Amino acid sequence: MVGAQRRCAPTRDIMEFEPVIGLEVHAELQTKSKMFCSCAVVDSMTAAPNTTVCPVCSGMPGTLPVVNQKAVEFGIRVALALDCEVQHTSIFARKNYFYPDLPKGYQISQYEQPLAINGKLIIRTSAGEQTIRVRRVHLEEDTGKLTHVERDGKSYSLVDLNRAGVPLLEIVSEPDLHSAEAARAYGEALRDILRYLGVNSGDMEKGVIRFEANVSVREKGDKGLGIRTEVKNLNSFRALERAIEYEIERQGKIIEAGGTVEQETLGWNETRGETYSQRSKEDAHDYRYFPEPDLPPLALEQNWIDEIQSKLPELPRAKYLRFIKDYGLTEYDAARLTDEKEIADYFESAVHHLPSTVQPKTVANWMLGDLFSLMNQADLKVGQLKVRPEALAELVKIVSEGQINQTSAREVLNEMFESGKSASEIVGMRGLKQLSDESSIAELVSQALKENPNEVASYKSGKTGVVNFLFGQVMKKAAGKANPQVVRTELEKQLAQ
């Protein structure tokens, strides 16, 4: 029944069942024009509704579609990055169904002969690395966008066709995923690849990537597939993970009670945290696929595919492994630094400006700690930073050389973040250069010990914790600018006399 809510809140883990999950991922391609016409691709969240629509994408009789070459190139780029077999000939087909945001009454997609097949994606989970097979990658056009409103006690649906006809790439996995965690890891890894390739912005809040999860459960040890449900239009990783967890629990309870899971299409209510029925699940024949009569077969030459292959960038997983090997980073640090290409490039640029005596791990620590914290507070991306990679490298260098201490360095970074000035410029202007001269520090330590004879006596009687107080007195005399390591060494030396 359409709109019926599922009130089956999860209460416990289903230990006797194994989930089987496949994902269909729809990613809008960042082309300038739509898939089959010259209308501009605009931001569907900010552009005025129905302003980039023409007879072709609005489905007027007598119009003819023309394939967007850049969209095909982007599709090949993704297929190659996923180790797919790019097909030299693929066929566009009409997928017939009727919905208010589909102006033609059909969608131009690919069915029996897609752009690419038989790929794979390696993901990282708490259980280790897993290889997920990719069944197919195919091109299609997006639908319009519906907005549901309430006015004067009545419900209305408004349609915006700006998005109708935007190039869409559908990436379909095999049912190789067996947990909501793995499904999320797959989605995140795929988004990283799309961003690295420059074919999709990855802005989930704008709906440029949408997930559909096919979920079933089976008894552990069973190799067959259970009856699946499809949860549509999940537009965040949180929604993807929660919806799958909910469906696993719901289906398990039905089977435990002796019931049968119905094959159907479901929606996800984020507020309620539950799925709801939209319609009975269609099979392929329900869409009445047939070859698009207005488009010839898409024929690709191998030399063009090879050219695209040669221009692929280093992909996230390869970069992750290299960062561990070449820079001595932990798996955690390497993962965080390679999630986005811009961050990875920033890190490498900073490392290349370091002297050989400073470990790259030090740059990683500053980026993942203080710099990311400042970025999050200011809601800035790495490309918007006033702190350039070479400036961060200079800060790390002068800290490692003992010119300033960690506390002063954080103050310097804060000012660099706000003003864009260099570390050395700020240190000079504010007189922050650290005192490391051993004879000067020895004199300060001697003064502090003479002024605090009771504490010195306590230390020598076995109360070693008092050394922290004496350390603080020395640092106070040095206005916080003394090198802490030199101070501690000198303290221990004079207290031992």
Image: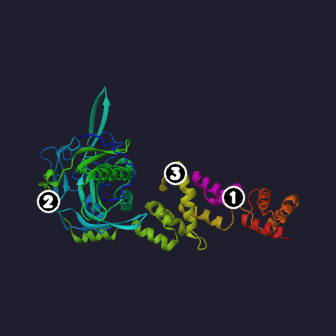
In the picture, which quadrant includes the N terminus? top left
Residue 284 drawn at (x, y percent): 16, 54
Q: Position of residue 387 (x, y in %)?
A: 55, 57
Q: Position of residue 359 (x, y in %)?
A: 58, 70
Q: Amino acid at mark 3?
A: Asn
Look at label 2 and name its amino acid. Answer: Pro
Q: Which residues are magenta?
A: 406-432
- Closer mark to the observer between disc 1 and disc 3: 3
For residue 187, above or below residue 402? above
Label 1 packing within 10 angstroms: few (<14), some (14-19), many (20+): few
Q: CA distance from mark 1 to mark 3?
A: 28 Å
Q: Residues within 10 Å of mark 3 (few under 14, many from 20)?
A: few
What residue sits 78% from the left and 56% below the top? 476
Near-viewer residue (253 or 226): 253
The residue carrying pointer 2 sits among few (fewer than 14), some (14 to 19) or many (20 or more) residues within 10 Å by Cα, namely: few
Q: What residue is pinned by disc 3?
A: 376
- Disc with the residue nearer the chain's start (1 vs 2): 2
Would residue 365 be seen by someone viewing this image from the given angle? yes
Report the mark closest to the observer, 1 or 2. 2
Under tag 1, what secondary structure?
helix
Disc nearer the start of the sequence (1/3): 3
What secondary structure is the magenta-colored segment mainly? helix
- For residue 466: magenta? no
Residue at mark 1 to residue at mark 2: CA–CA distance: 69 Å
Determine which residue is flagged by label 2. Answer: 296
Q: Quadrant of residue 189?
A: bottom left
Q: Tag count in the figure? A: 3
Q: Is residue 414 magenta?
A: yes
Measuring from the top left, give residue 307's x and y in whole percent: 29, 70
Among the 4 quarters of the image, the one containing residue 29: bottom left
Mark 1 belongs to which amino acid?
A: Gly
Dot 1 corresponds to which residue? 428
